[in-house]
Image (cartoon, rainbow, N blue to C red):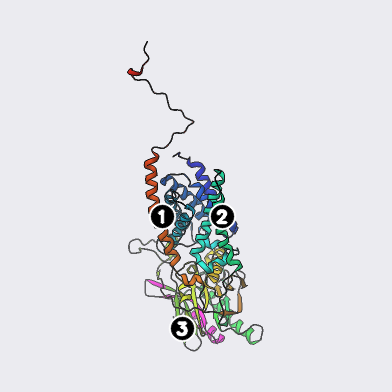
Amino acid sequence: MVLRPLLPAFGLAAVGGALLTASFEPVALPWLLPLGVACYAFATRDLTVRRSGLVGLVFGVVFYFSHIAWMKDSVGPDAWLALATVEALFYGLLGLAVPLLRRLPAWPLWLAAAWTTMETVRSGWPFSGMPWGRLAFAAIDTPAAPAVAYVGMTGLSFLLALSGFCLARLAEAALAREHRRVSAAAVVGVLALLVTPAVVAYDVPETGSTTVAVVQGDVPGPGNDILWDHEQVTRNHVDATVRLVADADAGRLPHPDFVLWPENSTAVDPFEPGQVNAGIREAVAAAGVPVMVGGIVDDGPKHVLNQGIVWDPRTGPGDRYTKHHPVPYGEYIPFRDIWDPKFGQLALISRDMKSGTRTEPLRVAGVWVGDAICFDVAYDDVMPPQVRDGAELLTVQTSNASFIFTHQIEQQFAITRLRAIEAGRWLAVASTNGRSGVIAPDGHVVASAEPRTTSVLVEEVGLSTALTPAMRLGAWPSRMFTLLTLSALVSGAVTYRRRQEFDGPAQVDPAVEPPAPSPTPSEAPVV
């Protein structure tokens, strides 16, 4: 085989990574996504395993460092460098598999399965992983978005990856002047699978309704530090709730059936006596309906819990949801018994946040509510299990104060809207000062609050118990694509090894002519 120079491959990989970044917020040009994926296929084409891995790593570095650039200014450059580096490595590992999978017939199919499997693995490992940057998350406000109700986030990522790799195959056929009918048909077929749900959207029947009030209390001071005056944060939510009741009594707003507060609406244990506890009781008593409070709860001298707490005006605090995926080095220190850093932002994490395991929805004002806290909304093991267990309505309690001046807010809101479509449920989002809103099951934003304002949104929302195909499939798409990837890698490795044995050594560049061999004594001309 002829060895391609690496520099052009690196350049093409970098272009592909940049195009993929531009598919997401804040640029949000999702039609660039298949082009970015196609660039990945082109850049890793006709390379050895090691070289393909290096090229894939370049793609991952350009994509992921730019995609989560918001971490640099919000959490810190050290956390940004560490997380982006780990996530970029997964695109390099995928690159190692490309030469094996390209040996197989219909390689775009196998490479799309491998891409999807890579996303699944990096979304949960190491520690709790990082789902940000999954291809599906770029699909909101496109004709492909309704497909998520049929195939879920994993299935949508697969179809988007397949569209990019089929596009690359079509372009390769055109460049080689091959017969292109099959490749063109594959591209059309994948696009049809993506777009058809937009015409035949999956409608989930509603069984009732409830009225929810979403409170965004705002964060005082600089706006990006929830601890700058955490008691005032709680007071803002108390006062906004009391005003809501006054407006409802005056007929300016409908009376809510329950009130939703955001994550970190209390930054200290709300059960401990003091101003925070008294403020919550004041708000709940004024509302006369349950309030879902977002609070940090003590769990011994070494641990805390990030919880959504249903606070009833008659019975007090009841059902609780605990955040499933605390952020490593943001909310807890992994292996603290081995390494306990006392410098920079890490020194502020004096206690580790424990992970929750609850998959049963909360009972709020007679409604089964599936809750998620902040980054939980990006994980497949949080909201979908609650929907399958009977959640009629979804809520997200988030803070986002640390990211208020970044594009993380838009990225998370896009993911949240896709979750509503995937589950076929109304979804209410409460943020301290980020992007609060009420989202319909088709992803349409019915109401929203401007960032860095004190706002109250009161909306009647539908309830449902029916399941979309995506909810019925559950984790099976991930399992199927993982199995397909492993099978393809084994088959591709065998084919790759055989081709290496039969191809012989790499061909020499024809531009460099080998020196003519010297004659042996027996071949020398006779004088």
* Image vertical order of residue 376 relative to residue 97, above or below: below
Rate crowding at label 3 as few (under 14), some (14 to 19) or many (20 or more) other CA atoms within 10 Å.
some
The residue beneath circle 2 is 185
The image position of residue 246, as x and y in percent, is: 62, 85
Q: Is residue 506 magenta?
A: no
Spatial distance from mark 3 to mark 2, Cα to Cα? 58 Å
Q: Amino acid at mark 1?
A: Ala
Cβ atoms at labels 3 and 2 below 8 Å apart: no
Q: Is residue 492 left or right of residue 23?
A: left
Q: Quadrant of residue 3?
A: top left
Q: Is residue 206 left or right of residue 107?
A: right
Secondary structure of residue under mark 2: helix
* Image vertical order of residue 518 relative to residue 178, above or below: above
The boundaries of the magenta stretch are 275-304
Secondary structure of residue under mark 1: helix
Q: Quadrant of residue 319?
A: bottom left
First reached walking from the N terminus: tag 2 or tag 1: 2
The residue beneath circle 3 is 317
The residue beneath circle 1 is 488
The image position of residue 410, as x and y in percent, is: 57, 64
